[in-house]
Each structure stands twice: as C-alpha cells, then as structure tokens.
Image (spheres, rainbow, N blue to C red):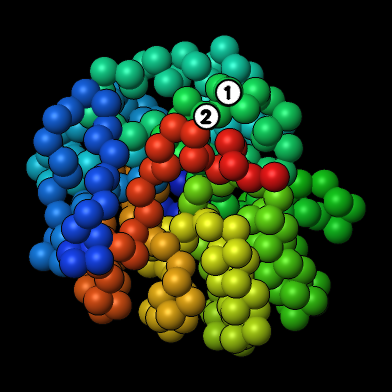
Amino acid sequence: MKKNITRRGFVAGTAAAGAGLALPTAHGEDAPPKTTEAGIPRIDFHTHRDNSTVEKLLEFAKERGVKLGIVEHAGTKENKYPVVLSNDDELKAFIASLADKPVYKGVQAEWLDWMSCFSKDAVAQLDYVLTDAMTCRNQDGSRIKMWEPAFKIDDAQKFMDGYADFYVEIMAGEPIDILANAMWLPNQIAKEYDAMWTEPRVRKVIDAAVKHGVAIEISSSLKLPRLPFLKLAKEAGVKFSFGSNGRGAGVAKLDYSLEMAKALNLTRADMFSPAPAGKKPIQTRK
C-alpha cells in the first residue's frame, strides 16, 4: 500500500500593556512559562506527540525554556493521519491523557466539517483549537491536500483569489483560536510568493483575523508569515502565537518566531492566550 504523504513530512523535506494580564497556567504546573526580554511567554502552541511520548517532549521543551501546547488532528476519518480524533469519546480520552501534564491541550481541526464530530461541551474542554488552509477544495469541490502530488493549479491568479477567500471562509465559519501555517503556498507557485500574496489578498486575510478574533501563528518550521505581512497584521491589531509544528526533537524550536517577535517589537499584549472557561470561541461564536 502506498504510504500517505503527511503535512509534516512535506514541511520537513505586555510588558506595560500586558502586565495585568494573567496567562492561564497549563495543568500540572504552578510556575508560569519563561518569557522573552519583552515579556512574551515562550509557548509553542503547535506540537504533536507522533512517535514520541509527552515525557520526552517535555524534556526537549525544558532544555529550550519553552512551554508546550500539544495538538492532535481532529475531524472525520476521511482525513488520513496516524491519529484523527473523530468523536467525543476520543477527544475526551486525549484530553484526559494530558490532564496531569504541564501542557496546553488543543486540536488541529481538519477541513470544514470537523465540528460535526463533536459536541460543543467536549470542544470547550480544550484550551484552544487551531487549523490551517492547507487542505482546500479541488475543482470538483472535494477536499484535497495541497502538498500532495495530485494537487494541480491551472490558473495561479484565479487559484489565489479563491485561496484568499477560503482563508476568510475558515475564520468566519469555524470556532477556532489560531490560524496555523498561515500564508503557505504549494510548491507549484511558491517561488512567485510576492506576486501571489498581493496586498489586497493579504489585507483580506488580516481583516478576517481581526473581525473574528483569530490569532495568526508565526511558524518557525515554515518561516512564515513573512515580515511585511506580519507588520500589516500587527498594525491592524492581530494577535499572534508561536508554533514549531514539531514532533520529537523538533518541538519548542522557535527561532523564527522569536526573531519576528523582536523585529516587530511585539509585547505580551500582542500574543494569543487561551480564553478562560465560558469565553472560548466554541462558546461565544454565533
């Protein structure tokens, strides 16, 4: 049987304003995470425990002075990953497995129908939900993973118009906290990055993030979004999170995230923090 290409496999080849903000403490710990000189908590909200253990991941995180948020893929079984949480029992078992660990608990929501698998009460037990736009609609309307060979682009500009609209659709329709892997492009057009991510398309994404209260991940694995986008996003009032999309020894590697935070003069007030009970997107979004 042909082995599926995974998203990770593809990717791999304030102080003053925020002084009064209480960062929720991950379960299993009393001490807050270490911070940067600007007072930003060093938190990697995008890590996976694939082929590893939480204990091992925590060793790497401790070495790097980073707090972890661990996510598992969540959605229908049509989404092909080693583990896909697809009902309340599976989601609650995942949450319970991390209950005594000093980590934040999240899911990486897959496609647009993931909420059909879960009750709102079960999702509300998570600390956060992140998703991305790397699985999109094929020409026939079916879902397709843009990092797989079967994905083709005939008209790049037409595709990009639809891609920017898809970002808006996700943020408008899904009760998510973080947009991960933001501004990524498939290989076929990646070398034309600036011609693809024009300012009107960029602003459309940023406006949607502000309107719907979605934080944008600064991805250290992808080194995205690029600085010009991040500057516009900061000016618009977007919140940011750090993410490695790491497994095993790849977790808690936040070099690009921290570099961009310094270049932007980000403070704690600019950063995502998990919402308290009763205030999560799943509970507040219409």
- Which mark is on residue 121? 1
Residue 162 position, x and y percent, is: 76, 68
Residue at the right extreme? 140
* Residue closer to the observer: 46 or 8: 46
Q: State left or right for residue 281 relative to residue 111.
A: left
Q: Describe the element under mark 2 as helix, strand or loop.
A: loop
- The residues tagged by marks 2 and 1 sit, at their Cα atoms, a distance apart of 5 Å
Q: Amino acid at mark 2?
A: Ala
Say if residue 135 shows up in the picture.
Answer: yes
On the rendered image, what quadrant is the N terminus found in?
Answer: top right
- Which mark is on residue 44? none
Residue 125 position, x and y percent, is: 47, 25
Q: Mark 2 = which residue?
A: 124
Residue 211 position, x and y percent, is: 60, 64
Q: Residue at x 23, y 29 (%)?
A: 102
On the rendered image, what quadrant is the C terminus found in?
Answer: top right
Mark 1 surroundings within 10 Å by alpha-carbon count, few (fewer than 14), some (14 through 19), many (20 or more): few
Q: Residue at x 18, y 64 (%)?
A: 15
Q: Describe the element under mark 1 as helix, strand or loop.
A: helix
Above/below status of 195 relative to 63: below
* Residue closer to the observer: 251 or 284: 284
Contact flag, marks 2 and 1 (Cβ < 8 Å):
yes
Q: Quadrant of residue 59?
A: top left
Residue 249 position, x and y percent, is: 24, 41
Q: Quadrant of residue 164?
A: bottom right
* Residue closer to the observer: 277 or 208: 277
Q: Amino acid at mark 1?
A: Asp
Q: Residue at x 59, y 42 (%)?
A: 284
Say if residue 250 shows up in the picture.
Answer: no
